């Protein structure tokens, strides 16, 4: 019987008791309240029957760039900039060589491991995005800065691997490299490839994936896939799709780029699985299970191997309410079951 892994791949909206106080809390207070929020999210994930809960919605983090940058020596902060959803984060200027001061993810990772038996995946903001979103006042070239961030991330993954080994969990440590900037400069694909590969260099017994979202450049991105030393891709498709049922090209126009993925696998050293985005995180529209089923069936028909498919939202659901987010995720789980019943 076919079984698709269901996964959450990004941030969720924080409860108001955490979000409204986040920057006014002491480190100890923030840790305690983030733990409370994470426990609530874990309970919800377990209740809907998802297989992989990511890191419980990233309750310990305010924003993906700032969270990592604040733990890196060699970065100075001069003020806040606005992100796409009207939140503000500290943007850093790289003024000297980069080194990791302490682990940004260990506390969160250990807490989640100790509070659920579900699979856990740690998202880490990737080296290319960290480079692209920083001011550079030290390194000669952009690629030099990207590689410096890659070496910092490599150290952090080693930290997380030690925690994983101490936990006694079976299977592989799962690391997701988040690269939202990864397709914004088409002439820098080699920097993306080299820096991502450098960030995981020399680390074994891990499952490495990349998450890229909201781009018109999938055909170019998929050309890079054979050079990436990864096990999987977690990508967005539902945002560009229709809400119509069916598995025709017209109904499933958001998923036609999967043909470029299949072509890329022909020359790749390993057959990277596809984490298929089936939930649009930018709308309150709750996708019915039948629509999610059809998106999976269409993707499976193109890919031709159910073993290469996992199912997830397009991106993090932090722009949606907690209630809407979990309605969407529950329907995702139910839609996967419908698809599994139809695939022999």
Image (spheres, helix red, strand yellow):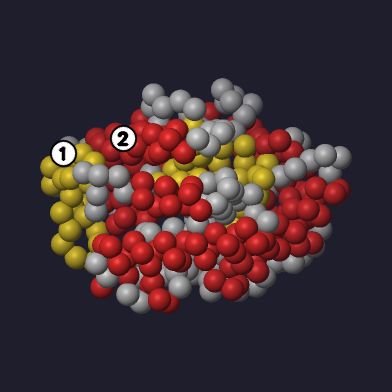
- Asked which secondary structure carries label 1, the reply is strand
Residue 77: image quadrant is: bottom left
**Residue 82: mark in rendering:** none
> Residue 270, how many percent across, how many down?
58, 25
Earlier sequence position, callout 1 versus callout 2: 1
Does residue 190 show up? no
Mark 1 burial class by Cα count in 10 Å: few <14, some 14-19, many 20+: some
User: How many marks can you see?
Assistant: 2
Q: What residue appears at the point 81 percent right and 58 percent down from the top-left corner?
A: 246
Nearest the eye: 96 or 41: 41
Separation of residues labelled 1 and 2 (CA atoms):
15 Å
Does residue 85 show up? yes
Q: Is residue 157 left or right of residue 340?
A: left
> Residue 261, how many percent across, how many down?
62, 38
Nearest the eye: 113 or 289: 113
Check the image and report above or below for 47 versus 213: below
Q: Is residue 283 left or right of residue 165?
A: right
Residue pointed to by mark 2: 155
Q: Is residue 294 left or right of residue 177?
A: right
Residue 29: image quadrant is: bottom left
Q: Quadrant of the C terminus?
A: top right
Residue pointed to by mark 1: 97
């Amino acid at each position: 019987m076919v079984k698709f892994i269901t996964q959450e791949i990004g941030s969720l909206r924080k409860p108001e008791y955490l979000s409204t106080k986040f920057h006014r809390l002491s480190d100890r207070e923030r840790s305690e309240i983030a733990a409370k929020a994470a426990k609530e999210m874990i309970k919800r994930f377990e209740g809907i029957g998802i297989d992989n809960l990511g890191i419980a919605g990233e309750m310990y983090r305010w924003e993906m760039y700032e969270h990592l940058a604040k733990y890196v020596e060699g970065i100075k902060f001069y003020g806040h900039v606005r992100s796409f959803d009207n939140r503000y984060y500290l943007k850093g200027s790289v003024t000297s060589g980069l080194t990791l001061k302490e682990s940004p993810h260990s506390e969160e990772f250990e807490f989640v491991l100790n509070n659920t038996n579900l699979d856990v995946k740690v998202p880490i903001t990737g080296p290319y995005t960290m480079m692209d979103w920083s001011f550079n006042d030290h390194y000669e070239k952009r690629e030099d800065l990207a590689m410096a961030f890659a070496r910092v991330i490599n150290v952090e993954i080693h930290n997380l691997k030690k925690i994983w080994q101490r936990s006694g969990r079976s299977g592989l440590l799962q690391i997701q490299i988040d690269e939202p900037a990864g397709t914004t400069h088409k002439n820098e694909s080699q920097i993306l490839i080299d820096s991502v590969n450098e960030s995981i260099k020399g680390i074994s017994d891990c499952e490495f994936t990349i998450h890229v979202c909201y781009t018109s450049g999938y055909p170019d991105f998929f050309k890079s896939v054979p050079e990436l030393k990864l096990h999987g891709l977690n990508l967005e498709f539902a945002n560009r799709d229709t809400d119509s049922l069916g598995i025709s090209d017209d109904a499933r126009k958001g998923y036609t780029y999967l043909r470029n993925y299949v072509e890329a696998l022909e020359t790749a050293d390993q057959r990277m699985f596809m984490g298929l985005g089936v939930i649009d995180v930018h709308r309150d529209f709750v996708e019915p299970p039948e629509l999610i089923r059809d998106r999976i069936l269409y993707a499976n028909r193109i890919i031709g191997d159910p073993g290469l498919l996992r199912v997830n939202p397009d991106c993090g659901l932090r722009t949606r309410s907690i209630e809407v987010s979990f309605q969407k995720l529950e329907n995702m789980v139910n839609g996967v079951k419908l698809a599994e019943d139809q695939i022999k």
